[in-house]
Image (cartoon, rainbow, N blue to C red):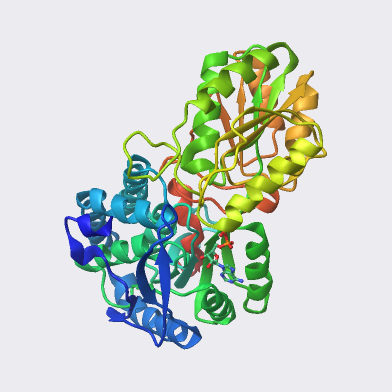
């Protein structure tokens, strides 16, 4: 698939440190999850390279922070334009290494680029404050300053957007960045870095360290232990988020964490059922269920349960599984064999505990999984507690509003939640009661660049996107000016 790139020079396999492409002392392979074939081998950088990248970022910081917001805006806007101009190629690279259908991959390129555009604009609006004085001889001011060198560690499920959502606000605020992309999807990240270079982002301001899984752990340790790195932004599993937080305690580092979810999707008796089915399809089966905001548990009220399950199962049976480059395919392969095993484990557990398959459920070859729906799901099932991260939907039955709220909140996670109702009182009651950072009401897809994305409880810290997305990359400084 990579032979078809319009611009073959976007296919970078060396890492970017201080404006130089570095081959590394070893390499690691990147595979196509649809075919299992090797796509490329990529520089495998380690702790010494991480130290070098951090030093380069620190050296590049004074010049970058000294630019005006408008100057940084112009460079970021150029990067946005280049990302969009190469949407097709970036999408192709993404489908090849990540597996999502080509149309979805191009959609992610637009979504990923939109963060660069948004924060390019925000670069001009890092406003301070003046406060009322407490005596007339003084004036009180608050200024915002870039926090310093930022590190970003990103996952494979959104190989571009999870990078731009962190890097764009950091750069806009005047911070240099060191990025460690997921080892399963480094090629999209490298292409984006190549476009950042073409956009004129100066050497050292954006560094990209590719590393295999072993070196990723070692590089993560260097980031956490560094006195120079002032902020770490991580998207990935709660388990790794906890490790990074613990490792960052000695240097009291600021952190943005976007961790696992266990999204409830509640359908009340008064819902518009077709709209709820539509929303459930979009929320559950996007990226073959591999997003942290995918519906993980569907709760449907007694009165509409059977009708919902029937309509939903019919739609799920119509999904087309296959190689993301094949026309009409809307379910690609899962990212790795372990992801397939997890779905199988959740399915087997659900069946052993009385679940009833109403769509899918049959094994497939390779890393493909048949989209599956299991009715009569119960709270003791694994899928009620753990994020499946695959195309498997358990449907639970409930009777009262309170029962649904209690079940939805019965998890240590709190990222996205969804519910369908046409009753305005219920909409407010349930929205307020759900312990989640985000609530989709009669909507299954809610993310966009100008809203605050993030979770509560053990789903993480901080918000990405929106004007709040700049907050983690600036420090407030209070100035008390006397002798007026
Ligand atoms: P997922 O479950 O989505 O694969 P992970 O949390 O395992 O999520 O991985 C997300 C990112 O975190 C990847 O870039 C991966 O290389 C990195 N990573 C995994 N373990 C560690 C670790 N111990 N320290 C630093 N980074 C890590």
Along the line of sight, which residue is nearer the eye, 322 or 64?
322
Q: Quadrant of the C terminus?
A: bottom left
- Residue 263 point in image, percent of width and height: 64, 39
Task: Answer left or right for 468 relative to 397.
Answer: left
Q: Residue furthest left?
A: 6
Q: Looking at the picture, how far across and down is residue 222, in whole percent? A: 54, 81
Image region (quadrant) for ligand 1? bottom right
* Residue located 59% across and 13% down the image: 422
Q: Is residue 78 visible?
A: no
Give me the residue at 33% from left, 82% from top. 23
Horizontal placement of 304 versus 281: left or right? right
Residue 180 visible in the current orientation? yes
Q: Quadrant of the N terminus?
A: bottom left
Q: In the image, is 387 to the left or to the right of 185?
A: right
Q: Is residue 146 left or right of 270 when viewed as pictured?
A: left
> In the rendered view, would you say 469 is above or below 427?
below
Relative to 272, say whether 62 is above or below: below
380 or 352, nearer to the observer: 352
Q: How many marks?
A: 0
Q: Quadrant of residue 12?
A: bottom left
Q: Residue at x 49, y 35 (%)?
A: 446
Residue 16 x, y percent position in the rendering: 33, 76
| Position of residue 170 measured from the top left corner of the image (x, y, whole percent) | 41, 63
């Amino acid at each position: 698939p990579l032979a078809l790139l319009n611009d073959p020079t976007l296919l970078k396999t060396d890492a970017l440190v201080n404006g130089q492409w570095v081959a590394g002392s070893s390499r690691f392979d990147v595979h196509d999850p649809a075919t299992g074939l090797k796509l490329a081998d990529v520089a495998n950088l380690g702790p010494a390279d991480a130290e070098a990248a951090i030093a380069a970022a620190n050296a590049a910081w004074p010049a970058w922070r000294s630019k005006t917001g408008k100057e940084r805006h112009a460079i970021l806007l150029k990067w946005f334009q280049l990302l969009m101009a190469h949407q097709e190629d970036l999408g192709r690279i993404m489908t090849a290494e990540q597996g999502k259908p080509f149309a979805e991959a191009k959609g992610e390129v637009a979504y990923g680029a939109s963060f660069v555009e948004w924060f390019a604009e925000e670069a001009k609006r890092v406003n301070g404050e003046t406060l009322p004085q407490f005596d007339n001889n003084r004036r009180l001011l608050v200024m915002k300053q870039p926090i310093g060198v930022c590190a970003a560690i990103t996952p494979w499920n959104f190989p571009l957007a999870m990078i731009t959502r962190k890097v764009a606000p950091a750069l806009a605020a005047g911070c240099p960045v060191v990025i460690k992309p997921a080892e399963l999807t480094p090629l999209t990240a490298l292409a984006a870095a190549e476009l950042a270079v073409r956009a004129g982002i100066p050497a050292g301001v954006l560094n990209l360290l590719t590393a295999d899984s072993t070196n990723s752990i070692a590089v993560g340790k260097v980031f956490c232990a560094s006195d120079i790195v002032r902020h770490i932004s991580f998207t990935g599993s709660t388990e790794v988020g906890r490790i990074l937080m613990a490792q960052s305690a000695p240097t009291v580092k600021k952190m943005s964490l976007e961790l696992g979810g266990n999204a409830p999707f509640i359908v009340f008796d008064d819902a518009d059922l077709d709209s709820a089915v539509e929303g459930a399809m979009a929320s559950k089966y996007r990226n073959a269920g591999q997003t942290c905001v995918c519906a993980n548990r569907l709760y449907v009220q007694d009165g509409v349960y059977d009708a919902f399950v029937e309509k939903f199962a019919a739609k799920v049976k119509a999904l087309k599984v296959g190689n993301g480059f094949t026309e009409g395919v809307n379910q690609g392969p899962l990212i790795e064999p372990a992801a397939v095993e997890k779905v199988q484990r959740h399915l087997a557990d659900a069946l052993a505990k009385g679940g009833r398959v109403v769509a899918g459920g049959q094994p497939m070859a390779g890393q493909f999984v048949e989209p599956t729906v299991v009715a009569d799901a119960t709270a003791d099932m694994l899928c009620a507690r753990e994020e499946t991260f695959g195309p498997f939907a358990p449907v639970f039955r409930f009777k009262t509003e309170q029962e649904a709220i209690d079940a939805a909140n019965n998890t240590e996670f709190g990222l996205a939640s969804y519910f369908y109702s046409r009753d305005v009182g219920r909409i407010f009651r349930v929205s307020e009661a759900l312990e989640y950072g985000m609530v989709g009401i009669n909507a299954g897809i809610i993310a966009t660049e100008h809203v605050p994305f993030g979770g509560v409880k053990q789903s993480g810290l901080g918000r990405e996107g929106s004007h709040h997305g700049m907050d983690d990359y600036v420090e407030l400084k209070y100035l008390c000016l006397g002798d007026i």
